[in-house]
Amino acid sequence: MVRHPPVIAAWGMGVDSTAMIIEWIARGLPLSVVLTADTGIEREETYAFLPVFQRWMSDRGIEHHVVRYTPRHFRHWPPYFTLLENCLTNAPLPSISFGRHSCSQKWKIQPQDGWVAAGQPARDCWAEGGRVVKLIGYDMSPADSRRYAHREGHVSALYDYRYPLREWGWDRTACADRIRAEGLPIPIKSACWLCAAQKVEELESLPRWCLRLIVLVEARAAPRLRTVEGLWRRSTKKRPGSMTRHIHDRKLLPAAEIDAIISGAPVDLVDFQRVAADMPAAERLPMRDWVERFNAGVERLSA
């Protein structure tokens, strides 16, 4: 048995994982490194909180890193490096819109596990037959209890998963109180702004540039959709299955602007990809370039 296995904390930049790390350190428990997976489409408020807690960790000598999923094989398409760019390149919706969670596996868990696997401490631990300890911030609230129940019994030959907040009996209120007691601002719920799990009021609080890109993602995926209406899957009494429809009905964007994005942007995007396919891989412009051009164009039209 390994005497001192590496202890890795998964920090999602939200309330639960932030409180978990604060209290873990306060109790004098061992922590090797904190890893944060960046999908590239977190909310602006989340990115604003990132350097705040990074400073807190640095002041206490806690090693921390931001990791990202890096695709390596683009075939004929332009390179993409965020979940948004992935959706625009290959025309899918995030897997959560189909009731699956492979987007989290690909963009969050995989890059963290890859970083750990590349390090000597983990390799030494595994070579001795041990398991790396991974701290996950699920609290005692009903929502996190459902997520925990889904993972309960999950066994890995490489990791020993621990859920400190559940061990301490903490719910979300207790987590927020702990962060506040540390003198830090309370972060918002950490989630991608394309996520099907976001609530109506969370969508309505997004800046206009995010709303435009949501319209674009649904328009790009629309020809392939058979079993879902859009990013929200299917309509309920509280909201439609398509975020675009909600944006239109609530007048979050002008109807003419929405129509222009739906009719023009996917065609221009496909033309961009067609040009990329004819270029040597090393010379292809990344999908980021097209997204920046799209954002600049719609800003001019709406001015």
Image (tube, rainbow, N blue to C red):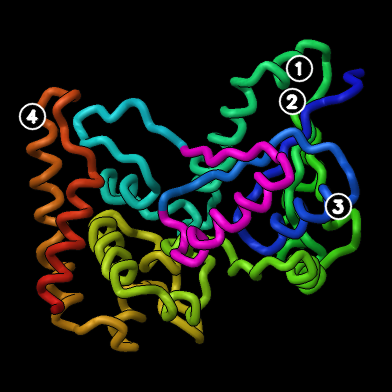
At 54% across and 41% down in the image, what residue appears? 66
What's the magenta region? Answer: 41-68
**Image disc number at residue 158:** 2
At 75% across and 33% down in the image, what residue appears? 32
**Image disc number at residue 278:** 4
Horizontally, residue 149 falls left or right of residue 117, namely right
The three-letter amino acid code for the residue at tag 3 is Ala
Say which of marks 3 and 2 sits in front.
3
Tell me which label, 4 or 2, sits earlier in the chain. Answer: 2
Query: What is the spatial separation of the Cα atoms under label 3 and label 2, in whole angstroms?
Result: 27 Å
At 26% across and 35% down in the image, what residue appears? 79
Tell me which label, 1 or 3, sits earlier in the chain. Answer: 3
Say which of marks 1 and 3 sits in front.
3
Query: What is the spatial separation of the Cα atoms under label 4 and label 3, in whole angstroms?
Result: 57 Å
Residue 152: image x %, image y %? 80, 47
Picture quadrant where residue 130 is located: top right
Q: Residues within 10 Å of mark 1 (few under 14, many from 20)?
A: some
**Image disc number at residue 126:** 1
**Do callouts 2 and 1 mark residues in contact (Cβ within 8 Å)?**
yes
The three-letter amino acid code for the residue at tag 1 is Trp
Query: What is the spatial separation of the Cα atoms under label 4 and label 2, in whole angstroms?
Result: 43 Å
Instruction: Residue under label 3, please give it.
Output: 26
The three-letter amino acid code for the residue at tag 4 is Asp
Tell me which label, 3 or 2, sits earlier in the chain. Answer: 3
| Quarter of the image with the N terminus in it | top right
